[in-house]
């Protein structure tokens, strides 16, 4: 399976623009951008992504709270989530992974390689979850 649809949740508009250029324009992914957790919870009912790229620190509902709420929706329980954060201390990274994220990307990120990086993460997720899937 190929990575195609990505839901991006980020409160900083300038980062949303860079990610949109990196993922939609450069890499050709179908991208839906949300400015926060509440918006993501609304969008996810109309748009089921292959992967969710989630900012960790947002006002109102932070990334972890957003992930918890998304996981309550039956069709979102197995969508891989990648956190993107400037706070990358090992304890925080482990907290995101323990919460169910498949990886953590550090800000600032390289826009030129972001699409490839997410595809690599997605393919690794698929191959690790293949053993869980029964045909």
Image (cartoon, rainbow, N blue to C red):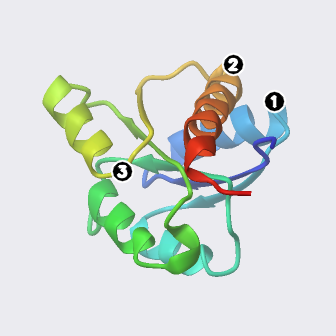
Decide which of 1, 8 is in the foreground and name it: 1
Helix, strand or loop status at disc 1 = helix
Label 3 CA crowd tier, 10 Å (few <14, some 14–19, many 20+): some
For disc 1, the marked residue is 26
Asked if the residue under mark 3 is in contact with the one under mark 1, i.e. CB atoms within 8 Å, the reply is no
Residue 80 point in image, percent of width and height: 53, 49
Q: Is residue 35 left or right of residue 115?
A: left
Tell me which corner region of the image, top left, top right, bottom left or bottom right, holds residue 111: top right
Is the residue 7 above or below the residue 88 in the image? below
State whether residue 90 is above or below residue 72: above
| Residue of label 3 | 100
Circles 1 and 2, Cβ within 8 Å, touching? The answer is yes
- The residues tagged by marks 1 and 2 sit, at their Cα atoms, a distance apart of 8 Å
Q: Earlier in the sequence, mark 3 or mark 2?
A: 3
Q: Residue at x 18, y 25 (%)?
A: 89
Name the residue beneath numbered marker 2: 112
**Residue under the point 82% across and 37% down:** 25
Answer with left or right where residue 9 lies relative to residue 100: right
For discs 3 and 2, the disc positioned in front in the rendered view: 3
Percent coordinates x, y for residue 113 in the rendering = 66, 19
Q: CA distance from mark 1 to mark 3?
A: 28 Å
Instruction: Tell us which disc is closer to us: 1 or 3.
Output: 3
User: In x, y percent, where is residue 115?
Assistant: 69, 30
Mark 1 or mark 3: which comes first in sequence?
1
Q: Residue at x 47, y 52 (%)?
A: 10
Q: On the rendered image, what quadrant is the N terminus found in?
A: top right
Q: How many marks?
A: 3
Q: Which quadrant would the C terminus be assigned to in this image?
A: bottom right
Q: Where, by quadrant of the figure, is residue 87 drawn?
A: top left
- Assign a secondary structure to mark 3: loop
């Amino acid at each position: 399976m190929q990575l195609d649809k990505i839901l991006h949740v980020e409160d900083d508009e300038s980062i949303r623009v860079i990610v949109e250029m990196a993922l939609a324009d450069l890499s050709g992914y179908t991208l839906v951008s949300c400015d926060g957790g509440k918006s993501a919870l609304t969008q996810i009912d109309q748009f089921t992504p292959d992967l969710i790229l989630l900012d960790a620190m947002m006002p109102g509902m932070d990334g972890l709270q957003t992930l918890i709420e998304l996981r309550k929706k039956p069709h979102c329980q197995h969508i891989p989530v990648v956190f993107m954060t400037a706070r990358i201390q090992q304890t925080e990274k482990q907290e995101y992974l323990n919460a169910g994220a498949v990886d953590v990307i550090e800000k600032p990120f390289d826009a030129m390689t972001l699409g490839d990086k997410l595809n690599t993460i997605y393919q690794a997720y698929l191959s690790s979850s293949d053993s869980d899937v029964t045909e």
